[in-house]
Image: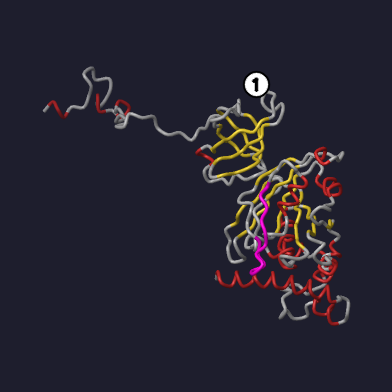
């Protein structure tokens, strides 16, 4: 039976048309090209800084000289490339763009890569939430805005800001607003040992020269409780910012959120008659809580560096909580090495650590 003979006609090649090397792959039924993991290099991409984010669209500033085809400084609108859909792109990020980067009305560029971040400020919804919310990238400083009254200042909230700043490697500053309503001295005494630069401000008498000097050449993120006057201060520092301002509810004592998203604004000291180097301020939405679910306990301890000598003297494995045996913090309170302010600092530290330990226990 000849159909069983797999030899080709000339006998030189066994199996003939049924040889492995002659089998042809089935054509793609959809007639489309297979997907590849290779991405274009985007050699013509232009660099910029994200100055604002709004519902999937990004305002990106292209600096003078960044685009070899256009020397203008300009702000463009961009979307993100599909391969970056899982990346959080935030205010302060350095990015690379392709597409229409002219900045003309109706144009849309595309962000194709994200640069390395020097710092990253994050927060969580609360201490039990391990999902972090990225607030701003590449900030050098955090300006904590607290009101002397209306709303009342909260030591615990400032401690949380400080822990997040030190964890991110950002230098903290403190501004006390509405000092005409109450004496800020007793509140500021709590943080005197930390040697944080402090500015006292009130409407019509803002220390603009001193603050501009502190902001010069740096990117500073402004954080604060709703209603403390953060947007008012930014409008004084950047007169053309036109940030919305709100009021404090007389019944609840709470402020109204007037900033709905983070935005970077460049200072121009000349607008207020000052001779100083410009900087960047990042206005963030006002918050009533600042979760540290993403911050490890060691980072919280480092933020209380005024207590560091006592913490270092504790027994190995000490939790530093109220029920910790032989904790040096308790000994320092008992023998008077820590005064009332120091004891309050210990209580604040322990509250943050307790929230962390409670969260870890609930996860087990």
Q: Tell me which corner region of the image, top left, top right, bottom left or bottom right, holds residue 98.
A: top right
Residue 306 in magenta stretch: no
The answer to whether 191 appears left or right of 108 in the picture is right
Residue 71 visible at all: yes
**Left/right of residue 363 with respect to residue 121 in the rendered view:** left
Percent coordinates x, y for residue 22 in the rendering = 30, 25
Considering every residue shown, the one lying at the far top of the view is 10
- Residue in the foreground of this view, choosing between 278 and 316: 278
Q: Is residue 249 magenta?
A: yes
Our reading of the magenta stretch's main secondary structure is loop
> Is residue 356 at least partly visible in the picture?
no
The span picked out in magenta is 243-255
Residue 264 position, x and y percent, is 69, 43
Q: Is residue 248 left or right of residue 82?
A: right
Q: In what element is the residue under mark 1?
A: loop
Q: Residue at x 78, y 53 (%)?
A: 171
Q: Which residue is mark 1?
A: 69
Question: Depth check: 355 or 312 in front?
Answer: 355
Q: Camera-side residue: 313 or 122?
A: 122
């Amino acid at each position: 039976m000849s159909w069983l003979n797999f030899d080709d006609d000339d006998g030189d090649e066994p199996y003939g048309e049924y040889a492995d090397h002659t089998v042809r792959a089935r054509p793609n039924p959809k007639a489309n090209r297979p997907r590849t993991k290779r991405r274009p290099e985007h050699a013509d991409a232009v660099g910029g800084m994200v100055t604002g984010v709004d519902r999937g669209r990004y305002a990106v500033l292209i600096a003078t000289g960044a685009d070899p085809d256009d020397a203008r400084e300009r702000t463009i609108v961009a979307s993100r490339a599909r391969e970056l859909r899982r990346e959080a792109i935030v205010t302060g990020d350095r990015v690379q763009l392709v597409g229409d980067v002219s900045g003309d009305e109706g144009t849309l560029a595309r962000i194709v890569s994200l640069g390395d971040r020097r710092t990253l400020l994050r927060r969580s919804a609360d201490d039990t939430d391990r999902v972090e919310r990225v607030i701003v990238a590449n900030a050098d400083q955090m300006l904590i805005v607290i009101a002397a009254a209306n709303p009342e200042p909260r030591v615990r909230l400032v401690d949380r800001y400080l822990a997040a700043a030190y964890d991110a490697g950002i230098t903290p500053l403190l501004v006390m607003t509405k000092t005409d309503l109450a004496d800020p001295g007793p509140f500021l005494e709590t943080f005197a040992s930390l040697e944080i630069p402090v500015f006292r401000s009130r409407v019509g008498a803002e220390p603009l020269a001193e603050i501009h000097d502190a902001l010069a050449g740096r990117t500073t993120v402004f954080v604060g409780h709703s209603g403390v006057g953060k947007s008012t201060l930014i409008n004084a520092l950047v007169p053309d910012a036109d940030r919305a301002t709100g009021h404090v509810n007389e019944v609840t004592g709470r402020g109204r959120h007037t900033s709905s998203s983070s935005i970077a604004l460049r200072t121009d000291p000349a607008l207020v008659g000052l001779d100083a180097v410009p900087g960047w301020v990042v206005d963030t939405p006002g918050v009533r809580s600042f979760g540290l679910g993403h911050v490890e306990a060691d980072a919280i301890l480092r933020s209380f560096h005024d207590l560091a000598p006592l913490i270092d003297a504790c027994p190995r494995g000490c939790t530093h909580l109220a029920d910790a045996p032989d904790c040096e913090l308790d000994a320092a309170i008992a023998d008077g090495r820590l005064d009332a302010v120091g004891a309050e600092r210990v209580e604040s530290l322990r509250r943050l650590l307790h929230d962390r330990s409670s969260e870890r226990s609930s996860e087990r």
